[in-house]
Image (cartoon, rainbow, N blue to C red):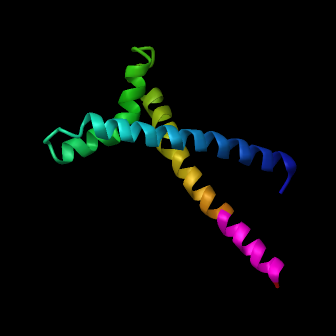
Amino acid sequence: MGTWKRGLFWLAYIISGICFVLTIIVFIIGFFHHMHDTGGIKSVIQILETPITGFIKLTNGTIQKSVIEIILLCIVSYVLPTFFCIATHYIRKNKRLALESKDE
């Protein structure tokens, strides 16, 4: 793999790692915020949408609820953290395979 491809991968990996940590923090905040709601599934949905609604509230209305902005927030809140988890799995798998082949 080329040097620029590796650099691009690691840049995306670091950015997605930051998004992963922020999403986990927002889920925890959403859990504590909606913990006393008695709506059952409604509370779960509110916790899952906390990364999007929390970011909209954080920017004091600068970010509106337009379709493009919601899509970008979904990518940052859900797609990039998923990429981070999958990439971490394959990095560990490749490292394990490299160590096994080195021992032989």
Q: As drawn, which residue projects farthest toward the left? A: 38
57 versus 92 height, above or below: above
103 versus 48 height, above or below: below
| Left or right position of 51 against 13 | left
Q: Position of residue 61 (x, y in %)?
A: 39, 14
Give 69 or 76, whichever is nearer the viewer: 76
On the image, which quarter does residue 63 sit in? top left
Give 66 or 103, whichever is nearer the viewer: 103
In terms of secondary structure, what is the magenta stretch mainly? helix
Q: Position of residue 28 (x, y in %)?
A: 37, 41
Q: Is residue 13 magenta?
A: no
67 versus 74 height, above or below: above
Q: Which residues are magenta?
A: 92-103
Q: Is residue 98 magenta?
A: yes
Q: As drawn, which residue projects farthest toward the bottom? A: 104
Quadrant of the drawing holding the N terminus: bottom right
Write the residue at 79% across / 49% down.
5
Write the residue at 79% across / 50% down.
6
Write the residue at 24% across / 37% down.
34
Q: Position of residue 50 (x, y in %)?
A: 35, 35
- Mark yes or no: residue 66 visible: no
| Left or right position of 9 against 45 | right
| Left or right position of 92 against 25 | right
- Mark yes or no: residue 78 visible: yes
On the image, which quarter does residue 59 sit in? top left
On the image, which quarter does residue 49 sit in? top left
Q: Position of residue 72 (x, y in %)?
A: 50, 33
Write the residue at 66% across / 42% down.
14
| Left or right position of 25 against 86 | left
